Image: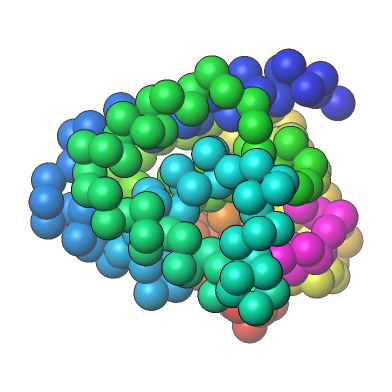
């Protein structure tokens, strides 16, 4: 298990990688559809910045203002921050490559947040970035045992997941095998990554959005 300082080092590394990606995007790419619901790339970026700047006190205040609807709160916050524009989004995330504040929840969830939303942006734009094995395994090991927010435990029940580019596997049943990053994304219900996987378990995953 990674220490808190190790987790934050990995979060900061992934944020720095996203800063580099965002710095290269054109206006058309910022306006493109992401893999995260109906959000554009710019709105996903707003959500990433929001999480990076968040504190528990502000989180609960904003959640209350949204009628304690997490989806409403997240959507409103993402769009509000996205409206500052690409250059400010880059600047504000760059400022969060050393800070350790975060909303309520485990630090591992923050690592998963930046990994997954990074791919929500990169994949539809045809861009690539692969976090280190230990980063991806830490995220997968956290999500395999919880249904909070993204329902990963339920989604992968009865399926054996096996990475073909890292030393990691989990579960029993029909197998879904492929790159570790694609397994992590499939655990979150990102159907676009199922094409990277092989095995009878992929059919089951495809039915579990």
Q: Is residue 1 above or below residue 148?
A: above
Is-magenta flag for residue 144? yes
**Which x, y percent locates residue 108?**
73, 38
Location of the N terminus (image quadrant): top right
Between 179 and 66, the one lying in front of the other is 66
Relative to the observer, which residue lies in front, 102 or 159? 102
Quarter that holds the C terminus: bottom right
Residue 78 spot, x, y in % from top left: 43, 59
The outermost residue toward the bottom is 207
Residue numbers of the magenta segment = 143-153
Q: Main secondary structure of the magenta part?
A: loop
Is there any visible trace of residue 47 in the rendered image?
yes
Residue at the (37%, 63%) spot, across then down: 79
Figure coloring: rainbow
Give whichever of 186, 48 is nearer the camera: 48
Q: Residue sitting at 54 percent across and 39 percent down? A: 52
Q: Is residue 31 magenta?
A: no
Q: Report the number of discs.
A: 0
Q: Nearer the viewer, residue 140 or 204?
A: 140
Q: Is residue 132 visible?
A: no
156 on left or right of 89? right
At x 22%, y 48%, the residue is 85
Q: Position of residue 161 (x, y in %)?
A: 74, 54
Q: Residue at x 39, y 26 (%)?
A: 94
88 vs 99: above or below: below
Furthest residue in direction left, as rendered? 27
Q: Is residue 106 above or below residue 99?
A: below
In this rendering, would 85 be left or right of 192? left
Question: In the picture, residue 54 is in which quadrant?
Answer: top right
The reply, left or right, for residue 116 in relation to residue 49 is right
């Amino acid at each position: 298990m990674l220490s808190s300082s190790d987790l934050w080092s990995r979060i900061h590394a992934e944020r720095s990688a996203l800063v580099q990606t965002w710095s290269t995007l054109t206006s058309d790419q910022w306006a493109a559809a992401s893999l995260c619901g109906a959000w554009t790339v710019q709105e996903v970026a707003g959500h990433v910045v929001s999480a990076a700047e968040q504190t528990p006190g502000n989180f609960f205040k904003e959640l209350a203002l949204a009628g304690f609807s997490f989806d409403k709160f997240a959507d409103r916050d993402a769009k509000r921050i996205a409206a500052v524009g690409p250059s400010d989004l880059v600047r504000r995330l760059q400022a969060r490559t050393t800070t350790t504040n975060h909303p309520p929840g485990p630090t591992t969830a923050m690592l998963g947040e930046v990994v997954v939303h990074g791919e929500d942006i990169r994949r539809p734009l045809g861009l690539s970035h692969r976090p280190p094995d230990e980063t991806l395994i830490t995220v997968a090991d956290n999500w395999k045992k919880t249904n909070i927010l993204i329902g990963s435990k339920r989604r992968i029940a009865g399926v054996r997941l096996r990475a073909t580019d890292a030393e990691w596997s989990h579960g029993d049943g029909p197998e879904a095998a492929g790159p570790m990053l694609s397994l992590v994304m499939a655990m979150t219900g990102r159907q676009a990554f199922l094409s990277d996987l092989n095995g009878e378990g992929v059919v089951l995953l495809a039915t579990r959005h």
